[in-house]
Image (cartoon, rainbow, N blue to C red):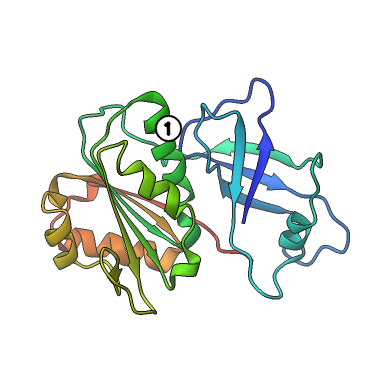
Amino acid sequence: FEYVFAKPKGFTFTAGQYLEWMVPHKSKDNRGPRRYFTIASAPSEPVVRLACKHVAKGSSYKQALTNLKPGDEVIASQLAGDFTLPKDTSKKLGFIAGGIGITPFRSHIAHMLETKERYDTALYYCCKTTTELAYADFFTGMTTKLPLQYTEVIAKEPVVEPREAGFVTADMLARLTPDYLERHWFISGPPPMVNAYKTLLQKAGVPKRQIKTDFFPGLA
């Protein structure tokens, strides 16, 4: 689900940063009224986008989000994060996202479009099933407007080209992104997935200094 809020006057941020979002509500469970979410919108957009995954029997927090009505407010604070793009636009980039870990890349790529900063980018979006893909139409559309290679990698259901089955591998990178060793890689998703792909990239020969990671806590 995506929740879209009017941007408060004077609010600025850098693509890839996150906020602590507080949704006050009654009958809070032990996980409380606060969560950290990356801002999914670009800094230049007139709105602030929050996207998250909902599961059956989820938290009271997610239920409170679902119950929000037009005009309701949430309290967002503690802007932070260094999962941001390099200043040098000549650097080639590689993005690997797992599930809802796609949100910083939605911000990055929307920012590229708005600012005309043309990073050569390869994005691998990993999900268990196609129903978990978020912003897929957005990324597909950006492939005609930006130097963007977009590949969906689906682990637990059959796929047809151009989607890839299973998980990102060194062979897949070599086949689809032959210059992967030159790229600066950004990995976002649940900690086990992020750690696994960081290890994969390092074993494939990508220098550690060219890998940046971003975890999300995964609280439902």
Task: Please state if 175 lies on the left or on the right of 68 as rendered.
Answer: left
Q: Where does residue 20 sit, x and y in percent of width and height? A: 64, 45
Residue underneath mark 1: 111
Task: Please state if 168 lies on the left or on the right of 82 as rendered.
Answer: left
The quadrant of the rendering that contains the N terminus is: bottom right
- Of residues 37 and 130, the one drawn nearer to the viewer in this rendering: 130
**Quarter holding residue 90:** top left
Residue in the picture at 44% in, 69% down? 130
Q: Where does residue 129 sit, x and y in percent of width and height? A: 44, 72
Q: Is residue 82 visible?
A: no
**Quarter holding residue 125:** bottom left
How crowded pointer 1 is (Cα within 10 Å; few <14, some 14-19, many 20+) is rated as many
Q: Is residue 206 visible?
A: yes
- Of residues 44 and 35, the one drawn nearer to the viewer in this rendering: 44
Q: Residue furthest right?
A: 26
Q: Secondary structure at mark 1?
A: helix
Please, is residue 11 above or below residue 183 in the view? above
Please, is residue 48 above or below residue 59 in the view? above
The quadrant of the rendering that contains the C terminus is: bottom right
**Quarter holding residue 78:** top right
Q: Where does residue 3 sit, x and y in percent of width and height? A: 66, 48
Residue kind at label 1, given as amino acid type: His
Q: Where does residue 65 sit, x and y in percent of width and height? A: 74, 55
Residue in the picture at 38% in, 79% down? 157
